[in-house]
Image (cartoon, rainbow, N blue to C red):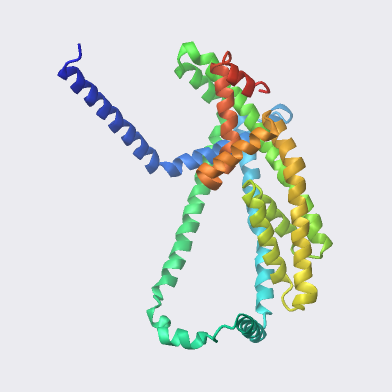
Amino acid sequence: MVTSKTISNGILRALATILIIGIVLYFLYEIQTVIVYLCISLILCLIANPLVMFLKNKLKFRDSFAAAATIIIFILLLIGFIFLFVPLIISQANNLSLLDTNQLQTQFMQTEQSIEAYFNIQHVDLNKMLKDSKITSMLNFGFFTGFINSILNFMADMGMGLVSVFFITFFFIKDQEHFKATARKILPDTNEDKIINSITKINHLLTRYFIGLLLQLTVVFILYLIVLVIFGNKNAFVIAFLCAVLNIIPYIGPIIGTILAAILTMISLIGQDFRSEILPTTIYIVIGFLLVQAIDNNISQPIISSKSVNSHPLEIFLITLISGITFGIVGMIIAVPLFTMIKVILKEFFPDNKIISVLTERI
Protein backbone atom coordinates (compact mmCIF):
# COMPACT_ATOMS: atom_id res chain seq x y z
CA MET A 1 0.00 0.00 0.00
CA VAL A 2 1.30 3.38 -1.03
CA THR A 3 1.26 5.84 1.85
CA SER A 4 2.09 9.50 2.07
CA LYS A 5 5.30 8.54 3.87
CA THR A 6 6.37 6.31 1.00
CA ILE A 7 5.65 9.09 -1.50
CA SER A 8 7.56 11.60 0.61
CA ASN A 9 10.56 9.28 0.87
CA GLY A 10 10.49 8.70 -2.88
CA ILE A 11 10.39 12.43 -3.57
CA LEU A 12 13.24 13.05 -1.13
CA ARG A 13 15.36 10.31 -2.72
CA ALA A 14 14.68 11.74 -6.19
CA LEU A 15 15.63 15.25 -5.05
CA ALA A 16 18.76 13.91 -3.35
CA THR A 17 19.74 12.06 -6.55
CA ILE A 18 19.18 15.17 -8.66
CA LEU A 19 21.19 17.25 -6.20
CA ILE A 20 24.10 14.77 -6.26
CA ILE A 21 24.06 14.61 -10.05
CA GLY A 22 24.01 18.42 -10.19
CA ILE A 23 26.95 18.67 -7.80
CA VAL A 24 28.94 16.11 -9.82
CA LEU A 25 28.22 17.90 -13.11
CA TYR A 26 29.16 21.25 -11.58
CA PHE A 27 32.37 19.74 -10.25
CA LEU A 28 33.22 18.30 -13.67
CA TYR A 29 32.48 21.69 -15.23
CA GLU A 30 34.85 23.40 -12.79
CA ILE A 31 37.67 20.94 -13.53
CA GLN A 32 37.03 20.79 -17.28
CA THR A 33 40.56 22.07 -17.97
CA VAL A 34 42.05 19.17 -16.02
CA ILE A 35 39.81 16.74 -17.93
CA VAL A 36 41.06 18.20 -21.22
CA TYR A 37 44.67 17.79 -20.05
CA LEU A 38 43.97 14.15 -19.14
CA CYS A 39 42.35 13.44 -22.52
CA ILE A 40 45.23 15.01 -24.46
CA SER A 41 47.76 13.11 -22.35
CA LEU A 42 45.88 9.86 -22.95
CA ILE A 43 45.91 10.47 -26.72
CA LEU A 44 49.65 11.22 -26.64
CA CYS A 45 50.18 8.05 -24.62
CA LEU A 46 48.30 5.99 -27.21
CA ILE A 47 50.29 7.54 -30.07
CA ALA A 48 53.56 6.96 -28.19
CA ASN A 49 52.87 3.29 -27.38
CA PRO A 50 54.67 1.83 -30.45
CA LEU A 51 57.71 4.03 -29.78
CA VAL A 52 57.70 3.10 -26.08
CA MET A 53 57.49 -0.61 -26.94
CA PHE A 54 60.40 -0.20 -29.35
CA LEU A 55 62.52 1.55 -26.73
CA LYS A 56 61.71 -1.10 -24.12
CA ASN A 57 61.95 -4.25 -26.24
CA LYS A 58 64.64 -3.37 -28.78
CA LEU A 59 66.83 -0.88 -26.92
CA LYS A 60 66.13 -2.34 -23.46
CA PHE A 61 65.19 1.02 -21.91
CA ARG A 62 63.69 1.04 -18.44
CA ASP A 63 60.17 2.41 -18.01
CA SER A 64 61.42 5.78 -16.72
CA PHE A 65 64.02 6.19 -19.48
CA ALA A 66 61.55 5.16 -22.19
CA ALA A 67 58.97 7.65 -20.90
CA ALA A 68 61.55 10.44 -20.60
CA ALA A 69 62.90 9.80 -24.10
CA THR A 70 59.37 9.86 -25.52
CA ILE A 71 58.53 13.15 -23.81
CA ILE A 72 61.79 14.69 -25.06
CA ILE A 73 60.88 13.65 -28.61
CA PHE A 74 57.43 15.24 -28.22
CA ILE A 75 59.01 18.47 -26.93
CA LEU A 76 61.50 18.58 -29.81
CA LEU A 77 58.67 18.05 -32.31
CA LEU A 78 56.71 20.89 -30.69
CA ILE A 79 59.73 23.22 -30.84
CA GLY A 80 60.29 22.28 -34.47
CA PHE A 81 56.62 22.91 -35.21
CA ILE A 82 56.85 26.41 -33.69
CA PHE A 83 60.05 27.36 -35.49
CA LEU A 84 58.63 25.98 -38.71
CA PHE A 85 56.21 28.91 -38.90
CA VAL A 86 58.72 31.69 -38.17
CA PRO A 87 59.95 31.90 -41.82
CA LEU A 88 56.34 31.91 -43.04
CA ILE A 89 55.38 34.80 -40.75
CA ILE A 90 58.47 36.81 -41.73
CA SER A 91 57.90 36.11 -45.43
CA GLN A 92 54.23 37.13 -45.35
CA ALA A 93 55.10 40.28 -43.37
CA ASN A 94 57.68 41.22 -46.01
CA ASN A 95 55.16 40.61 -48.77
CA LEU A 96 52.57 42.80 -47.06
CA SER A 97 55.17 45.56 -46.68
CA LEU A 98 55.51 45.61 -50.48
CA LEU A 99 51.80 46.29 -50.88
CA ASP A 100 51.12 49.56 -52.73
CA THR A 101 48.25 51.00 -50.68
CA ASN A 102 47.68 53.88 -53.13
CA GLN A 103 47.27 51.49 -56.03
CA LEU A 104 45.00 49.29 -53.93
CA GLN A 105 42.84 52.30 -53.01
CA THR A 106 42.61 53.32 -56.68
CA GLN A 107 41.54 49.79 -57.68
CA PHE A 108 38.98 49.77 -54.88
CA MET A 109 37.51 53.10 -56.00
CA GLN A 110 37.31 51.93 -59.62
CA THR A 111 35.57 48.73 -58.56
CA GLU A 112 33.15 50.71 -56.40
CA GLN A 113 32.31 53.06 -59.29
CA SER A 114 31.78 50.13 -61.66
CA ILE A 115 29.38 48.45 -59.22
CA GLU A 116 27.47 51.71 -58.70
CA ALA A 117 27.19 52.30 -62.43
CA TYR A 118 26.09 48.72 -63.14
CA PHE A 119 23.39 48.63 -60.46
CA ASN A 120 22.50 52.34 -60.83
CA ILE A 121 23.29 53.02 -57.16
CA GLN A 122 23.71 56.53 -55.81
CA HIS A 123 27.32 57.26 -54.88
CA VAL A 124 28.10 56.77 -51.19
CA ASP A 125 30.93 58.87 -49.73
CA LEU A 126 32.46 56.57 -47.15
CA ASN A 127 34.87 59.20 -45.86
CA LYS A 128 32.02 61.65 -45.19
CA MET A 129 30.00 58.94 -43.46
CA LEU A 130 32.89 58.14 -41.11
CA LYS A 131 33.36 61.81 -40.24
CA ASP A 132 29.65 62.40 -39.66
CA SER A 133 29.32 59.33 -37.45
CA LYS A 134 32.26 60.49 -35.27
CA ILE A 135 33.14 56.84 -34.92
CA THR A 136 36.75 57.61 -34.05
CA SER A 137 35.65 59.52 -30.95
CA MET A 138 33.74 56.49 -29.73
CA LEU A 139 36.65 54.07 -30.03
CA ASN A 140 37.88 52.69 -26.76
CA PHE A 141 41.64 52.70 -27.08
CA GLY A 142 41.89 50.71 -23.89
CA PHE A 143 40.88 47.78 -26.10
CA PHE A 144 44.45 47.50 -27.38
CA THR A 145 45.84 47.23 -23.84
CA GLY A 146 43.27 44.57 -23.05
CA PHE A 147 44.12 42.75 -26.26
CA ILE A 148 47.82 42.63 -25.38
CA ASN A 149 46.99 41.42 -21.87
CA SER A 150 44.78 38.72 -23.35
CA ILE A 151 47.62 37.52 -25.57
CA LEU A 152 50.01 37.40 -22.61
CA ASN A 153 47.45 35.51 -20.51
CA PHE A 154 46.85 33.09 -23.36
CA MET A 155 50.57 32.43 -23.70
CA ALA A 156 50.88 31.87 -19.95
CA ASP A 157 47.91 29.48 -19.94
CA MET A 158 49.31 27.67 -22.96
CA GLY A 159 52.68 27.26 -21.27
CA MET A 160 51.06 25.95 -18.11
CA GLY A 161 48.91 23.60 -20.16
CA LEU A 162 51.89 22.19 -22.06
CA VAL A 163 53.83 21.58 -18.84
CA SER A 164 50.80 19.87 -17.29
CA VAL A 165 50.14 17.70 -20.34
CA PHE A 166 53.75 16.54 -20.65
CA PHE A 167 53.95 15.87 -16.90
CA ILE A 168 50.77 13.74 -16.95
CA THR A 169 51.82 11.99 -20.16
CA PHE A 170 55.17 11.03 -18.61
CA PHE A 171 53.48 9.14 -15.78
CA PHE A 172 50.83 7.65 -18.09
CA ILE A 173 53.65 6.15 -20.18
CA LYS A 174 55.88 5.21 -17.25
CA ASP A 175 53.27 3.57 -15.01
CA GLN A 176 50.93 1.90 -17.53
CA GLU A 177 51.40 -1.56 -16.04
CA HIS A 178 51.04 -0.21 -12.50
CA PHE A 179 47.74 1.47 -13.41
CA LYS A 180 46.46 -1.81 -14.90
CA ALA A 181 47.44 -3.74 -11.77
CA THR A 182 45.73 -1.16 -9.56
CA ALA A 183 42.60 -1.30 -11.71
CA ARG A 184 42.45 -5.07 -11.23
CA LYS A 185 42.39 -4.60 -7.46
CA ILE A 186 39.67 -1.94 -7.55
CA LEU A 187 37.32 -3.45 -10.13
CA PRO A 188 34.51 -5.78 -9.01
CA ASP A 189 35.41 -9.45 -9.39
CA THR A 190 32.31 -10.30 -11.42
CA ASN A 191 33.18 -7.92 -14.30
CA GLU A 192 36.95 -7.63 -13.84
CA ASP A 193 37.91 -9.69 -16.89
CA LYS A 194 35.39 -7.95 -19.13
CA ILE A 195 36.58 -4.48 -18.11
CA ILE A 196 40.26 -5.40 -18.50
CA ASN A 197 39.60 -6.95 -21.92
CA SER A 198 37.67 -3.84 -22.98
CA ILE A 199 40.50 -1.55 -21.89
CA THR A 200 43.08 -3.71 -23.70
CA LYS A 201 41.08 -3.77 -26.94
CA ILE A 202 40.32 -0.04 -26.77
CA ASN A 203 43.99 0.71 -26.16
CA HIS A 204 44.99 -1.44 -29.15
CA LEU A 205 42.37 -0.06 -31.56
CA LEU A 206 42.84 3.60 -30.60
CA THR A 207 46.61 3.26 -30.92
CA ARG A 208 46.06 1.93 -34.45
CA TYR A 209 43.56 4.71 -35.15
CA PHE A 210 45.85 7.56 -34.15
CA ILE A 211 48.79 6.03 -36.01
CA GLY A 212 46.49 5.63 -39.03
CA LEU A 213 45.45 9.26 -38.67
CA LEU A 214 49.11 10.33 -38.70
CA LEU A 215 49.65 8.22 -41.82
CA GLN A 216 46.64 9.83 -43.51
CA LEU A 217 47.87 13.35 -42.64
CA THR A 218 51.30 12.43 -44.01
CA VAL A 219 49.78 11.36 -47.33
CA VAL A 220 47.73 14.57 -47.54
CA PHE A 221 50.80 16.65 -46.61
CA ILE A 222 52.88 15.09 -49.43
CA LEU A 223 50.12 15.67 -51.99
CA TYR A 224 49.61 19.29 -50.86
CA LEU A 225 53.36 19.84 -51.01
CA ILE A 226 53.52 18.51 -54.59
CA VAL A 227 50.73 20.88 -55.68
CA LEU A 228 52.38 23.92 -54.06
CA VAL A 229 55.85 23.08 -55.42
CA ILE A 230 54.51 22.63 -58.96
CA PHE A 231 53.13 26.18 -58.90
CA GLY A 232 56.26 27.65 -57.29
CA ASN A 233 54.98 28.60 -53.85
CA LYS A 234 57.94 29.83 -51.78
CA ASN A 235 56.55 28.53 -48.49
CA ALA A 236 55.24 25.26 -49.87
CA PHE A 237 56.45 23.06 -47.00
CA VAL A 238 54.96 25.16 -44.19
CA ILE A 239 51.63 25.81 -45.95
CA ALA A 240 51.26 22.11 -46.86
CA PHE A 241 52.02 21.10 -43.27
CA LEU A 242 49.52 23.58 -41.79
CA CYS A 243 46.75 22.56 -44.21
CA ALA A 244 47.44 18.87 -43.52
CA VAL A 245 47.08 19.45 -39.77
CA LEU A 246 43.73 21.13 -40.39
CA ASN A 247 42.59 17.86 -41.98
CA ILE A 248 42.18 16.52 -38.44
CA ILE A 249 38.79 18.27 -38.55
CA PRO A 250 36.69 16.05 -40.85
CA TYR A 251 35.10 17.69 -43.90
CA ILE A 252 35.42 21.28 -42.58
CA GLY A 253 39.19 21.19 -42.01
CA PRO A 254 40.09 20.65 -45.69
CA ILE A 255 37.87 23.58 -46.70
CA ILE A 256 39.57 25.86 -44.17
CA GLY A 257 42.95 24.61 -45.38
CA THR A 258 42.11 25.36 -49.01
CA ILE A 259 40.95 28.90 -48.19
CA LEU A 260 44.08 29.47 -46.08
CA ALA A 261 46.34 28.20 -48.87
CA ALA A 262 44.62 30.53 -51.36
CA ILE A 263 45.03 33.56 -49.07
CA LEU A 264 48.70 32.82 -48.31
CA THR A 265 49.38 32.26 -52.01
CA MET A 266 47.86 35.62 -52.93
CA ILE A 267 49.87 37.37 -50.21
CA SER A 268 53.09 35.71 -51.37
CA LEU A 269 52.50 37.01 -54.91
CA ILE A 270 51.86 40.64 -53.89
CA GLY A 271 53.61 42.98 -56.31
CA GLN A 272 52.84 40.89 -59.40
CA ASP A 273 50.05 41.42 -61.89
CA PHE A 274 46.72 40.29 -60.44
CA ARG A 275 45.07 39.00 -63.64
CA SER A 276 48.03 37.25 -65.24
CA GLU A 277 49.89 35.97 -62.16
CA ILE A 278 48.08 36.11 -58.82
CA LEU A 279 44.58 34.99 -59.85
CA PRO A 280 45.56 32.08 -62.18
CA THR A 281 48.12 30.68 -59.72
CA THR A 282 45.63 30.84 -56.85
CA ILE A 283 42.93 29.12 -58.93
CA TYR A 284 45.33 26.34 -59.97
CA ILE A 285 46.36 25.74 -56.35
CA VAL A 286 42.71 25.64 -55.21
CA ILE A 287 41.92 23.11 -57.96
CA GLY A 288 44.96 21.05 -56.91
CA PHE A 289 43.86 21.09 -53.27
CA LEU A 290 40.33 20.03 -54.27
CA LEU A 291 41.79 17.07 -56.18
CA VAL A 292 43.87 16.10 -53.14
CA GLN A 293 40.76 16.26 -50.96
CA ALA A 294 38.87 14.08 -53.44
CA ILE A 295 41.66 11.49 -53.26
CA ASP A 296 41.76 11.71 -49.47
CA ASN A 297 37.98 11.52 -48.97
CA ASN A 298 37.44 8.63 -51.38
CA ILE A 299 40.61 6.57 -51.03
CA SER A 300 43.06 7.20 -48.20
CA GLN A 301 40.70 8.33 -45.41
CA PRO A 302 38.10 5.52 -45.68
CA ILE A 303 40.75 2.81 -46.10
CA ILE A 304 43.11 3.97 -43.34
CA SER A 305 40.37 4.88 -40.84
CA SER A 306 38.29 1.76 -41.43
CA LYS A 307 41.28 -0.57 -41.26
CA SER A 308 42.68 1.02 -38.10
CA VAL A 309 39.47 0.65 -36.06
CA ASN A 310 37.97 -2.32 -37.93
CA SER A 311 34.86 -0.39 -38.96
CA HIS A 312 33.10 -0.04 -42.31
CA PRO A 313 33.78 3.29 -44.12
CA LEU A 314 30.04 4.01 -44.20
CA GLU A 315 29.90 3.60 -40.41
CA ILE A 316 32.69 6.14 -40.00
CA PHE A 317 31.03 8.60 -42.39
CA LEU A 318 27.63 8.38 -40.72
CA ILE A 319 28.91 8.59 -37.14
CA THR A 320 31.12 11.56 -38.05
CA LEU A 321 28.20 13.31 -39.77
CA ILE A 322 25.83 12.72 -36.86
CA SER A 323 28.42 13.86 -34.30
CA GLY A 324 29.14 16.98 -36.34
CA ILE A 325 25.47 17.91 -36.56
CA THR A 326 24.96 17.26 -32.84
CA PHE A 327 28.16 18.52 -31.22
CA GLY A 328 29.92 20.59 -33.90
CA ILE A 329 33.62 20.43 -34.75
CA VAL A 330 34.64 18.83 -31.44
CA GLY A 331 32.08 16.08 -32.03
CA MET A 332 33.49 15.39 -35.49
CA ILE A 333 37.03 15.06 -34.11
CA ILE A 334 36.16 12.66 -31.28
CA ALA A 335 33.44 10.73 -33.15
CA VAL A 336 35.50 7.77 -34.37
CA PRO A 337 37.52 7.16 -31.15
CA LEU A 338 34.39 7.43 -28.99
CA PHE A 339 32.37 5.18 -31.32
CA THR A 340 35.16 2.60 -31.23
CA MET A 341 35.22 2.62 -27.42
CA ILE A 342 31.44 2.16 -27.23
CA LYS A 343 31.53 -0.74 -29.72
CA VAL A 344 34.25 -2.54 -27.76
CA ILE A 345 32.40 -2.14 -24.44
CA LEU A 346 29.07 -3.27 -25.90
CA LYS A 347 30.63 -6.35 -27.50
CA GLU A 348 32.40 -7.30 -24.28
CA PHE A 349 29.34 -6.93 -22.03
CA PHE A 350 26.52 -7.89 -24.46
CA PRO A 351 28.05 -10.39 -26.89
CA ASP A 352 24.77 -12.30 -27.39
CA ASN A 353 22.70 -9.32 -28.51
CA LYS A 354 21.97 -9.69 -32.23
CA ILE A 355 22.17 -5.99 -33.10
CA ILE A 356 25.42 -5.52 -31.19
CA SER A 357 26.92 -8.68 -32.69
CA VAL A 358 26.21 -7.32 -36.20
CA LEU A 359 27.64 -3.88 -35.45
CA THR A 360 30.78 -5.30 -33.80
CA GLU A 361 31.45 -8.32 -36.02
CA ARG A 362 34.73 -6.78 -37.27
CA ILE A 363 36.15 -6.18 -33.80
Residue 2 in picture, x, y percent from top left: 20, 14
Query: Residue farthest to the left?
Result: 4
Q: Is residue 30 above or below residue 115?
A: above
**What is the quadrant of the N terminus in the image?**
top left
* Residue closer to the observer: 312 or 80: 312
Q: Name which residue lies at 72% across and 43% down.
A: 216
Q: Nearer the viewer, residue 212 or 6?
A: 6
Residue 94, compared with residue 324, is above or below; it is below
Q: Where on the picture, by quarter, is residue 14?
A: top left
Q: Quadrant of residue 212?
A: top right
Instruction: Give the quadrant of the C terminus.
Output: top right
Residue at (62, 18) in percent of width and height = 357
Q: Is residue 255 visible?
A: yes
Q: Position of residue 189 (x, y in %)?
A: 47, 11
Horizontal and vertical percent for residue 294? 75, 48
- Whether residue 117 is situated above or below residue 78 in the rendered picture: below
Residue at (34%, 39%) from the top-left corner?
A: 26
Residue 52 seen in render: no
Side of 214 relative to 281 (left or right): left
For this view, does 60 lie left or right of residue 228? left
Q: On screen, 342 above or below 108?
A: above
State which quadrant residue 333 falls in: top right
